Image: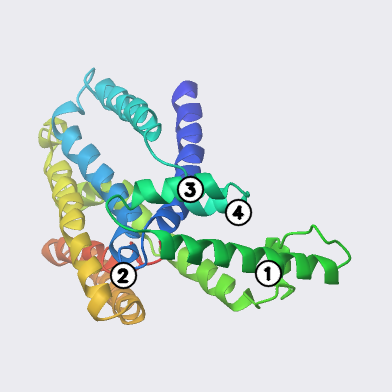
Amino acid sequence: MAMLIVARLLSGVALGSALGTFTMYTVEVTTPKARNSLGGMAQMAIIFGIMLSQTSSLGLSRPPLWRLLFAFSGVLSVLNMALLYFCVESPKWLAMNGKLADARDSLQQLRRGTDCTAEFEQLTSSVMINNTSELATGANNGNSTKTSSVIDVMLGRTPDNLRHQLVVTIVVMASQQTSGISGVSFYSSTLFNSISKPSESDAFTIPTLAQILASVLAISGTLVMPLCMVLATYIGRRPLMIWSHTVMALCCVLISVGSIVGLNALTITMVFVYYAAFFVGPGPIPW
């Protein structure tokens, strides 16, 4: 048990680091036109992984086969590490560190078959402007080599006051994590099991009805994700966030009502609607 706890802790730290790096890398290597669709790939990868684990557990959750689920995760991690060696470095990061020749080569690899001269000039210009602003900020604060920190942004000590943008980003990301989706995702089997109230004999039958419903729930989230990418282009991010949060709040009320009065069909239906609403708005849009 101690080994499982330590492994879970390490995997959680690694996942958090990977998500932050992945979203930053995606923004820096994609074109502005493709950023809308590719920006949501982080959440798409998460829900696809949840779907894969839920569907795999239908046949592998009985002992001793459940160990294969952990082994499969390790295989995917090793494969991911091997494929990362074929990824090019971020052109923006290279330019920020003065490696302009490498930055141009990296950008050309990402834009094969096209002339990236104009994009490269725009990239270097933005980096130069940013460096000039940073130096000016450092000079005003008595340090010509200082770069802006999160504290500087919060206190409004940057050339462009980014405090409002930082607060909005923090609130949006916090609302994503505090919306209750983690409880629905990680405890969906327990939730459906408490609703369906299986008999004592059915409780030991694998896969159970609760496991099947949890797998269908994960599949539905994966199917809804592409819809968000399309709607975000034509409707906008803000309306999707408002409507999805409204639907999620209403679903939470109806889930509570259905659980109290014993309307199992209403409770299960609202769980599915809640899950779909999350992956239309607060799931992919903050990334």
Q: Earlier in the sequence, mark 4 or mark 3?
A: 3
Which mark is in front, 2 or 3? 3
Q: Position of residue 265 (x, y in %)?
A: 11, 63
Residue identifier under label 4: 96
Label 2 to label 4: alpha-carbon separation: 33 Å
Query: Pointer 3: residues within 10 angstroms few (<14), some, or many (20+)?
Result: few
Q: Secondary structure at mark 4?
A: helix
Residue identifier under label 2: 281
Q: Quadrant of residue 283?
A: bottom left
Which mark is in front, 4 or 1? 4
Residue identifier under label 3: 21
Q: Is residue 216 left or right of residue 252?
A: left
Amino acid type, label 3: Thr
Residue 152 appearing in the image: yes
Towards the viewer: 108 or 50 = 108
Amino acid type, label 4: Met
Q: Earlier in the sequence, mark 4 or mark 1?
A: 4
